[in-house]
Image (spheres, rainbow, N blue to C red):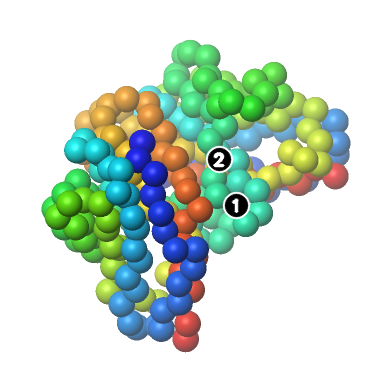
Amino acid sequence: GAVVSQHPSWVICKSGTSVKIECRSLDFQATTMFWYRQFPKQSLMLMATSSEGSKATYEQGVEKDKFLINHASLTLSTLTVTSAHPEDSSFYICSARSLAGGQGSYNEQFFGPGTRLTVL
Amino acid sequence: DAKTTQPPSMDCAEGRAANLPCNHSTISGNEYVYWYRQIHSQGPQYIIHGLKNNETNEMASLIITEDRKSSTLILPHATLRDTAVYYCIVRVFSGSARQLTFGSGTQLTVLP
């Protein structure tokens, strides 16, 4: 299946700093990328949806000025957590959806391995 | 998208079949049933999907009832590495940008 990578896999930062997480589709072009957040013992919650070359669509309750998303190309999306605080500590997972007729015939979503963010 | 109901946890003996149920009584005609799993501290992994016919691949089988209101994911010979949270998701299959919405899933523990 198609591969989605995330970098870094884990990061520890001080409160007030900004952290950038990269999401790449390695062997396919992604028209749409999704960012999820997962707190311990909870399910994945969608934060935002981004399409290449356009502004991201954020879910209700997610601050767009705090979680900056840039979908620069069909293979790269970045999530920047600005002025991070301890409550932003979480597991961030990106997902990419292929162009129609790309990997598979069912526009399946491929998930990255996740990034563990710890804010001290 | 239709809502799904899954048991919060299940155990299965290693080497035996694991049967994970999912109820989706409000599913509509154009909605597919997807199964993903998430091993601890990893991203979700696609397993299988189906519309109304039973499906099988190298990982699992998906049995969908005739009225499509429920389904069962079958792992024929569970191994310790199959311990994970399994998510049943119902969604329209289309070229749109609609995301997968995750419920609470079933924690499957395969016991040695």
Q: Secondary structure at mark 2?
A: strand
Res B34 visible: no
Q: Nearer the viewer, residue A100 or A7?
A: A100
Asked where in the image residue A12 lies, by quadrant, the reply is: top right
Q: How many marks?
A: 2
Which residue is under mark 1? Answer: A42
Q: Residue at x 34, y 83 (%)?
A: B15
Q: CA distance from mark 1 to mark 2?
A: 9 Å
Disc 1 marks which amino acid?
A: Gln
How far across and down, in percent of the image, does residue B74 sit?
Answer: 28, 68
How far across and down, in percent of the image, does residue A44 sit?
Answer: 54, 45
Quadrant including the C terminus of chain A: top right
Marks 2 and 1: in contact by CB < 8 Å? yes
- Residue B95 left/right relative to A79: left
How far across and down, in percent of the image, does residue A91 sit?
Answer: 63, 46
Q: Residue at x 46, y 45 (%)?
A: B102
Q: Residues within 10 Å of mark 1 (few under 14, many from 20)?
A: few
Which residue is under mark 2? Answer: A45
Q: Secondary structure at mark 1?
A: loop
Subunit under mark 1: A
Q: Residue furthest top?
A: A54
